[in-house]
Image (tube, rainbow, N blue to C red):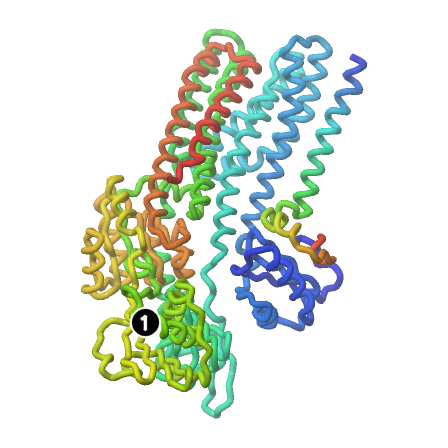
Amino acid sequence: MNGLAILIPIALSLGLAGLAAFMWSMADGQFDDLDGSSMRILIDAEDENSIH
Amino acid sequence: MNAPISHSKLTSHSEFVVPGMRCAGCIAKIEDGLAQAPGVRKARVNFSTRRVAVDHEPTIDIADLRAALADLGFNAEPAGLTGDLADRTESRRLLKALAVAGFASMNVMLLSVSVWSGADGATRQMFHWLSAMIAIPTVAYAGRPFFQSAWSALRKGRTNMDVPISIGVGLATLMSLYETVINGPHAYFDGAVSLLFFLLAGRVLDQLMRDRARDGAAVLLRQTAPGGMIRQPGGSTLWMPARAIAAGMDLIVSVGERFAADGRITDGNSRVDRSLVTGESALEPVASGSLVLAGTMNVEAPVTVSVTAAGPDTAIAGMARLMEAAGQGRSRYVRIADRAARLYAPAVHTLALASFIGWMIAGVGWHQALLIATAVLIITCPCALGLAVPVAQVVAAGSLMRRGILIKDGSALERLAEADTACFDKTGTLTLGRPAPDGALPLTDADKPVALALAQASRHPISAAVARVLESEGIRPATMSDMRETAGQGMEGYVDGRRARLGRPGWIDSALDADPRPGAAFAIDGQPAVMLSFADPLRPDAEAALARLTGMGMSLEALSGDRADPVAAIAHALHIPARAALTPADKVTAIEELQHKGHHVLMVGDGLNDGPALAAGHVSMAPASASDVGQTAADMVFLGDSLLPVPIAVAASRRTLRVVRQNFLLAIGYNVLAVPLALMGMVTPLVAAIAMSTSSILVVANALRLRSCAR
């Protein structure tokens, strides 16, 4: 019982952290251009423009 | 991309569609090149949608940005900001709901498994409360797409798949909450939440396919020019909006501008990009007296046009009206999942209600009766049905995409599977739509480099074709001097002091003018002139493709706007019946006649004149070489010179329909087994969870068999 009191909050907060990370990455537009992202790695001159 | 418009109020935002970007180099070139253009703050390429989003100072406008992109070597079309924004928001909303439901179902399942494996007393109580705290907000958030859709259907007095889903999920949540409060043994939180998860997965797949097709085509019906410069009686000019332009006015069109009205050129020589209308990307030369159409683009030199038709009277506006009218029939099409739901939803509701009433009569009390009715609703909830159609269609669409066939939405696959008659346009559909030599070119090895040098210097379609053929033979162009083009006639130049000419047959030698075949003539001083004839050949495997369609039980017909003779020749070569000299409206009538007889017509066409017919057909396909109008009107677009994608798509759509039907059978079979258990009150949350997951996995696994359906 005592173990549960620690383990369940840990399990839930880890899951919530994953969910929050997904929500953030989607709001950040990381899923908007999946084809482009795989291409951008080939661009040599990384300047400000192509980082974000 | 979604950075707030922050730094100052003086930033404007524009978006362009750039179909020509192909590689990482293009991304870098566009972004870096635009960033250096005056007035541009930031440029960001989205490669998946072939779009560029530009933040710029308001002092520069769309025309300046287009010019900057043209300098970089890219053709760009301004894109509307609002159009597909709604779609993008919708897929985001569904994805977020899916993520929340996924998180919740995993955690609730974790808690439920410990309850099923024997936790009781205070532990079970605590786990139920925890589940409730996760599940209730999840249902409220992730269930919204279903609740909204169900509510809007109910308000119109109809029912759809979302009605039993909403009732089932809502009732299960409320009953479980009640169970938790009274410290009962059975809570269905896991059932409610994982149901939402599976169903949302189906919804997301469906939406994903729609998005992908939209990005893939990336061509919209480009708008005709908003207006143009009109010459005033005094000699001055005035910009007028398109709706104010009337026949008889003089329209001055500068380079790079689209014609705002139909008309006849009165002054100037130029070339016109007619790809909007014909799909032909080669530029067409125009001179005084030539007809030009609204929506085509003036590319080479400024011209003056005497307007013959403007606004709603232009050819393109008339075509848009025809397409709109013809497309109305298709909007009445009911998708297969909705047709299933019309039968399924009432049956499920009756069953649940009957079990509630039955157990009440049996005297188990309202609590037990309601619990059993809830179990019936959860078991019958169309989980597998919701996945059955979208998974099969997404897998099939992926397979077709690898074969170069792009599908706009899932309903196109369903409609294609029903097609039993196929109508083909001739030019550009059965034929390649571009000139190719009629037999081997009658040139000596010594002449070929000279002919290539002349052909490369001109942009006429026939010249381009000559150059293409010679280049493919590995010929290198000769060095020539004093090259000169006579507009509308041909090229000439000197090689080793002898004059060589390539051009219109009558210009080279009047004796060749009598040759009825289209083509060009070639001559070097001191040698007799030779005729290079060209024809618009059939697509290489047209005959095999049509034979395969016939073998699949489809009846075929060619509908062409061309003259009777060439159409008859093609029809004879391909062994299909044909109708010639049809106007766009005649094509629509022909298709509607067939549909009235109960046929489902697949229309394959490419040009502007096929637009209405493509919209009228039960389903339609266009080659990727088609005009924008054709690509917009068609349900599917296929790449390449081959016509085989048509039978491949038909075969794949029929396989898909077969798998969808099997999936329905699987889902119904599962219900036949599980519903009696639920009616008898033997379905505990554990049984419900196992049954639901098994049926979903079965359906998905069956759909995956379609991975190689395009063959």
Relative to the observer, which residue lies in front, B31 or B438?
A: B438
Residue drawn at (56%, 44%), measured in percent from left and top?
B90
Q: Is residue A6 above or below residue B559?
A: above
Q: Is residue B294 visible?
A: yes
**Closer to us: B320 or B305:** B305
Residue found farthest to the bottom: B234
Position above or below: B34 against B555:
below
Q: Amino acid at mark 1?
A: Leu
B272 relative to B533 in the view: left or right: right
- Mark 1: secondary structure: loop
Quadrant housing residue B197: top right
Letter of the chain that mark 1 sits on in the rendering: B
> Residue drawn at (50%, 10%), measured in percent from left and top?
B681
Circle 1 crowding by C-alpha within 10 Å: few under 14, some 14–19, many from 20? some
Kindly tell me whether residue B247 is visible in this rendering. Answer: no
Percent position of residue B625, x then y: 40, 59
**Image position, residue B127 (x, y; %):** 70, 17
Residue B685 falls left or right of residue A9: left
Q: Nearer the viewer, residue B455 or B271?
A: B455
Residue at screen point 28% across, 54% down: B424
Which quadrant is home to the C terminus of chain B?
Answer: top left
What residue is disc 1 on?
A: B443
